[in-house]
Amino acid sequence: MPTETFFNLPEEKRARLLDVLLDEFSQNDYDNVSIGRITERAGIAKGSFYQYFADKKDCYLYLIQLAIEEKTTFLRRQPSEPSTDLFAHLRRLIEAGMQFQFRNPRLAHIAYKALFDDAPLPEETLNVIRRGGYAYFRSLVESGIANGSLDPRIDSDIAAFVLNAVFTELGQHLMQRFGVLPDQLLVSGADAFDHDDVRRAIHQVITILETGLRKK
């Protein structure tokens, strides 16, 4: 993760560097990302880069973490009544996730590549993604138990684990099931999944989760 020196940069300089990082990592696969190009475009010395990040891997994992945080913040902004049932909310979250992709194409592109195409550090990358997703789903489960959507007898940690595992792997499953290639996904984003068969499959996933978790 970035050093304090990075976060202490003047806002304009930090924003310019972040803009260059998003361009470089979204437009190139990991092996072809160039720290030299980054520093040249950002107008900083190469030595300064290493005052902000330990190495390219550190920078990459920061962008993955940033994508998770930005998407989680975006999803939390979606309107939801306190009494809204969890499963209706999950359906809305899938739609909101597609909206996030349209509004944050570079971050979403990096995240798609990390999951489906260009994961140079698969275990470390997935660990970052799992940690962020788990915390979010645990809060949803606790809200669902509180508002009566979920069976109060369920273990909230296990339920959060199940939801996180399902939604972490759902994109890969849909790609395999419907023959969506990584290159197609990277070009089209959420549009690659915009057809009725995919919507029916997602509905089935939510129905299966609902059958097991809903309060009887």
Image (cartoon, rainbow, N blue to C red):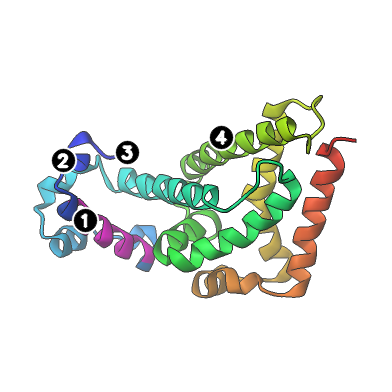
Main secondary structure found in the magenta portion: helix
Q: Earlier in the sequence, mark 1 or mark 4?
A: 1
The residue indicated by pointer 3 is: 1
Residues tagged 2 and 3 counted as in contact (Cβ below 8 A)? no
The residue indicated by pointer 4 is: 135
- Label 2 vs label 1: CA separation? 13 Å
The type of residue carrying mark 3 is Met
The answer to whether residue 145 is above or below residue 108 is: above
The residue indicated by pointer 1 is: 17
The residue indicated by pointer 2 is: 51
The type of residue carrying mark 4 is Ala
**Can you tell which quarter of the image residue 91 is in?**
bottom right
Q: Which residues are magenta?
A: 14-26
Q: Earlier in the sequence, mark 3 or mark 1?
A: 3
Q: Earlier in the sequence, mark 3 or mark 4?
A: 3
Residues tagged 3 and 4 counted as in contact (Cβ below 8 A)? no
The type of residue carrying mark 2 is Gln
The type of residue carrying mark 1 is Leu
- Label 2 vs label 4: CA separation? 30 Å
Residue drawn at the location 19% of the way across and 63% of the way down: 37
The percent position of residue 143, horizontal first and vertical second, equals 67, 34
User: Disc 3 on helix, strand or loop?
Assistant: loop
Q: Earlier in the sequence, mark 2 or mark 3?
A: 3
Residue drawn at the location 51% of the way across and 51% of the way down: 77
Residues tagged 1 and 4 counted as in contact (Cβ below 8 A)? no
The answer to whether residue 160 is above or below residue 197 is: above
Residue drawn at the location 69% of the way across and 50% of the way down: 89
- Label 2 vs label 3: CA separation? 12 Å
